[in-house]
């Protein structure tokens, strides 16, 4: 397992943005962003909210693509 960093959006009272676009107190319902820039783009649609970062363990850390053999041959 590896440690990964994720980002979520919270409102002024500590609720988390959910997939449905509403806010909930349960962090299990929160949308997790892998990229901080992506979280800030979504934040633009929710004035008064903030981007929070957190770390957690994951069995499947972020996939880092490797160049394919076909691309190297080209």
Image (cartoon, rainbow, N blue to C red):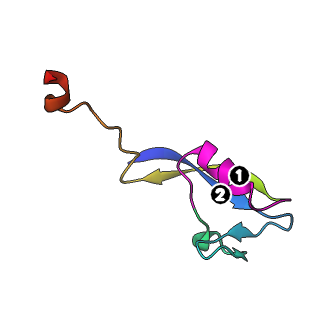
Element type where label 1 sits in the image? strand
Work out whether residue 28 or residue 49 is closer to the camera in this orientation and state it.
Answer: 49
Asked if the residue at tag 1 contacts the one at tag 2, i.e. Cβ–Cβ closer than 8 Å, the answer is yes
Q: Position of residue 42 (x, y in %)?
A: 67, 56
Work out whether residue 65 or residue 14 is closer to the camera in this orientation and state it.
Answer: 65
Q: Which residue is mark 1?
A: 52
Magenta segment boundaries in residue numbering: 32-48
Q: Residue furthest top?
A: 73
Apparent side of residue 67 relative to residue 63 in the rendered image (left or right): left
Compared to residue 66, the image places residue 57 above or below, namely: below
Q: Position of residue 36 (x, y in %)?
A: 62, 44
Apparent side of residue 64 relative to residue 27 in the rendered image (left or right): left
Residue at image position (72%, 55%) is 43
Count the labels in the image.
Answer: 2
Q: Quadrant of residue 8?
A: bottom right
Residue at image position (20%, 29%) is 71
Residue at image position (50%, 46%) is 4
Upstream in sequence: badge 2 or badge 1: 2
The 10 Å Cα crowd at callout 2, few under 14, some 14 to 19, many 20 or more, is many
């Amino acid at each position: 397992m590896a440690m990964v960093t994720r980002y979520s959006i919270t409102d002024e009272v500590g609720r988390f943005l959910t997939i449905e676009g509403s806010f909930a107190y349960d962090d299990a319902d929160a949308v997790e962003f892998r990229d901080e820039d992506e979280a800030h783009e979504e934040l633009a649609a929710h004035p008064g909210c903030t981007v929070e970062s957190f770390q957690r363990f994951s069995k499947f850390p972020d996939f880092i693509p490797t160049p394919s053999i076909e691309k190297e041959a080209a």
